[in-house]
Amino acid sequence: MFVTFYDCVLPGLLAYFAHRTLDAQVAADLTSETLAEAFASRRRFRSHGDGSASAWLYTIAGRRLGRYLRRLRVDDAARRRLGMERIELAPDDVERIESLIDFEHVGREVRQAFDGLRSDQREALRLRVIEGRSYREMARELGCSEETARARVSRGLKRLAAQLDG
């Protein structure tokens, strides 16, 4: 179900960040962070009718964007104190960079690679990478040793990388 939601919201969410940051890499990073946070907190979401899932997602996105902008202001103040000039990209440069990235294709590839993992590896990666659980918590939830939980994460990441590199 989340995969269907992901497919529906990815282009709009990416455009939301791209238009506000004018930076393709930042837009991609904020999009992935937002979707990861949404996935991790999906059990807390309660639907209240049409559009509530999108509203919930864009609330998360707005908070992510706010954190990014605050961090940018702090970095900018530090740069000015040091007397460093900011490198500015022209709108044409931004468009050229964005045209090199097929975000939908990347999202589909990652989803397909993730879906291609063994179920125990998918679950281990979900718990460790997406939800940020400790290996101790993972082992308890998965009913295995910490070493086994570590091995599942390691093997899952290796297989995921191999599928994406292939």
Image: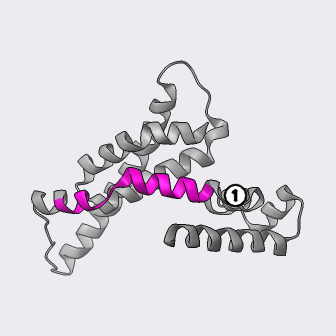
Q: Residue at x 89, y 65 (%)?
A: 144
Above or below 63: residue 68: below
SS under mark 1: helix
Residue 17, given in percent of the width and then of the height, sits at 32, 48
Q: Given the current orientation, which residue lies at the most extreme top position?
A: 49
Residue stretch rendered in magenta on the structure: 96-114
* Label 1, residues with CA under 10 Å away: few <14, some 14-19, many ≥20: some
Q: Position of residue 27 (x, y in %)?
A: 33, 55
Left or right placement of residue 18 versus residue 129 in this view: left
Q: Is residue 58 left or right of residue 132?
A: left
* Image location of residue 8, percent across then percent down: 45, 36
Instruction: Please give the residue where the numbered disc 1 appears in the rendered image.
Output: 122
| Of residues 99 and 138, the one drawn nearer to the viewer in this rendering | 99
Type of secondary structure dominating the magenta stretch: helix
Left or right of 41, for residue 153: right
| The image quarter in which residue 41 lies | top right
Residue at 69% across, 58% down: 122
